[in-house]
Image (cartoon, rainbow, N blue to C red):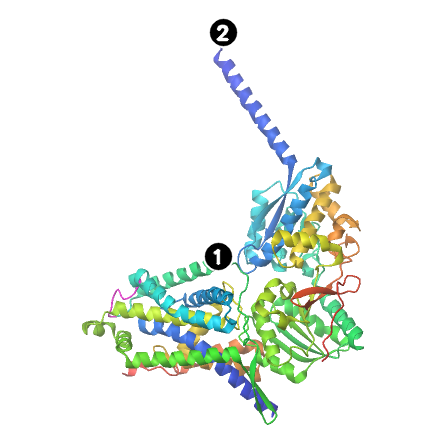
Amino acid sequence: MLIVESILQTLLTGIIIGSIYGLLCVGLSLVFGIMKIVNFSQGDFLLIGMYSGFFISAILLYFGLSSFLSVFIASIICLPAFFLVGNLFYRVLLRRVSGTDIRLPSAADHQAQLVITLGISMILQNSALMFFGTRPRSVTTELSSEAWIIDISSMMLFINKAQFIIAAIAFSVVALLVLLMNVTSVGRRMRAVASNAMAATYMGIDFQKQYATAFGLSLALTAMLGSLMITYLSFHPYTGFDFIIIMYAGVVLGGMGTLSGAFLGGVMIGIIQQVSTLFLPVQLQNMVVFAAFLLVIILRPQGLFGRDVSRV
Amino acid sequence: MIRFGRRFLLSASVGAVVAIAASGANTAFAAEMDEIKFGVLLPLSGAMARSGNLTKAGIEAAVQDINAGGGIKSLDGAKLKPVILDSGSSVESAANAAQRLLAQEPDIVAGIGVWLSSHTLAATEITERAGLPWLTFSYSDMITNRGFGHVVATAPAASRFAAESIEMISNVAKNAVGSPPKTMGIIADGTLTAQTYVNALKDGILKNAGIEIVVDETFTSPLSDATAMVQRLRRAMPDITLVYTGNVADSKLVFSKIKEFGLGTDVPLYAMGTQNAAPEMLENVGAELLEGLFVVVAQWGIEKNRELEQSLIAQTGEPWIIDDTFVSYGSTMLLADAVERAKSTDREAIMQALRSTDTAEGPSKFFPGKSLSFDETGRIENAPLLLVQWRGGKPITVYPEFLAVEDPVWKKN
């Protein structure tokens, strides 16, 4: 019975943590899949989302709102705010090094993108260091260390309330996003550009506008999630870096260019991380994630849920 | 009309230049005697900047107090002046900062720093070659075991922590429930400091204390989730659990999960290191989760330093003072006392004065021991470790009894 309890508990925790990773991967996948940009500053935008959530919720707390509600409202405020930031950011900076040749992303574009996004990452990280210092921050909410307990025939399973709510939000957001991409004209235009920017241009679609929207969406989702994550996680100016590797691993594991694949890639990372602790020391959980990642790269380079473009 | 020959003008000019230079040199000499410079290397940028700044606050407060009290009296009231350099966040940057300090400030009489043991090890390799007396509050045994003649360590050696912390915990448990703990859970990160401590426990200390390890978990920081580890803790329900985390983010995840699994009020916990008793722990983890947690530290607020603590709180704006600030204040006071006794700014004379310190007065007031002295390696003697316990959102010294501010509270398992 103890073994069953352990397996169920690690699976449950893995799915919850994985869903949070999943939304992070989706944020990155929007940039990576649609714009073909390797964005090294994604983790630092997550960090800025965390700081924004922290300060906005501090203001809301001052007006007597409960801590979790304050963080929740702060995350909603982050959505449009970071969409605009991302949009502006693309138009001012990335546009100059993205889509200069719409037929194929050129090597020169990639090099410039790499330098720009790495530079932005450093600027964001050091600005956070300069303005907020290295003091770790988080918001202790009434739900952070509370659990729903499932008691089934002498088995007790614990579900962290804050993490479960965030995972549910992440799942809903991804479902809405998939709907947006498949049903609305905005989504169809973005998919067209992702699929073939030149053909989309011939069809009268302004691909730069779609790139700006995709980048805005990506930052909005990442910052919103960052804002929610501060309810269970302490952060400091270097926190973004801890997540960037997980984001890329999830996107590649799930399949590049597919949003649902990226989400499932994140979920798989969460599950692998947790389930591996049943057989191996906790210390090796990230090693197992990367072993699985390498295995997928070797056996199925297009990712578990990606399409093999060469066969089309 | 008086006429000056070319030769006269030349000699007059040379004479004037020499006179001006000599007068300048005298002025410079006078200025040097007015102030006594010492180097300070601390991590003021990067991930350790918070600790570096808290340590710097202690040094600056001590310098302010020394200078306000008339400076170094045996040197005509010369004022102390710290030359503070950022040692950065890597061993290389710490070594470079030490090189820079020696090159840019040849007239410094001593140095203090670098906070992290590995950084101190690198920096003292350089300061030792220059014969510069160096005061450090790093714990690593290697710092004083290399046979260096110019290093003085004002914090107890790391090797003492394992045995003495178990002894303290056992004594507190014995007094509270009549018997020492029989089983122990260990949740520790994979850093060298944590693993050195844990390995020392496993290499006989726990066996000698009659304690069996029932949970032994090592994780790699940053921790993503603590469920698996805390689930094992819940099953084993050890008499005492060690949580050895190197940062607040990991601590928050572990303590939140302990409470989430309903163990918050049942399992006696102890942690190692100042970071687990720092104000940011309260901000991030919360008073409820921390209540009753024991933390082993080298210095803390005790009756002896009550006045100093209040003064440092007023100066730093911190809600309480942690050992980084206490020990850096005490070390600066010790340096001033050594210069005072040496009656000279000669580095060897100061070093001799530092090593021969043996007093229950003066700088001894700022260290928890009954007196202040150093062994032949330069490591502080008579420095008891302290056990502080989180009580109502503040860590209070509860052990050893002669230094305790309040009695310890042991959770009934």
Q: Which residues are magenta?
A: A97-103
Residue type highlighted by circle 2: Ile
**Residue B170 placement (x, y as % from top left):** 77, 73
Is residue A154 visible in the rendered structure shown here?
yes
Is residue A254 visible in the rendered structure shown here?
no
Residue B176 placement, left or right of A26: right
Which quarter of the rendered picture does the C terminus of chain B lie within? bottom right
**Residue at x 30% of width, y 65% of height:** A98
**Residue at x 35% of width, y 66% of height:** A86
> Which mark is nearer the camera, 1 or 2?
1
Q: Quadrant of residue A259?
A: bottom left
- What kind of element bears circle 2? loop
- Placement of A172 over or under A131, stated as above or below: below
Is residue A99 part of the magenta span, yes or no?
Answer: yes
**Residue at x 61% of width, y 53% of height:** B316
**Residue B295 placement (x, y as % from top left):** 68, 67
Is residue B290 part of the magenta span, yes or no?
Answer: no
- What kind of element bears circle 1? helix
- Placement of B98 over or under A139, stated as above or below: above
Residue A131 has which mark? 1
Residue behind mark 2: B2
Q: Quadrant of residue A157?
A: bottom right
Residue type highlighted by circle 1: Phe
Q: Main secondary structure of the magenta part?
A: loop
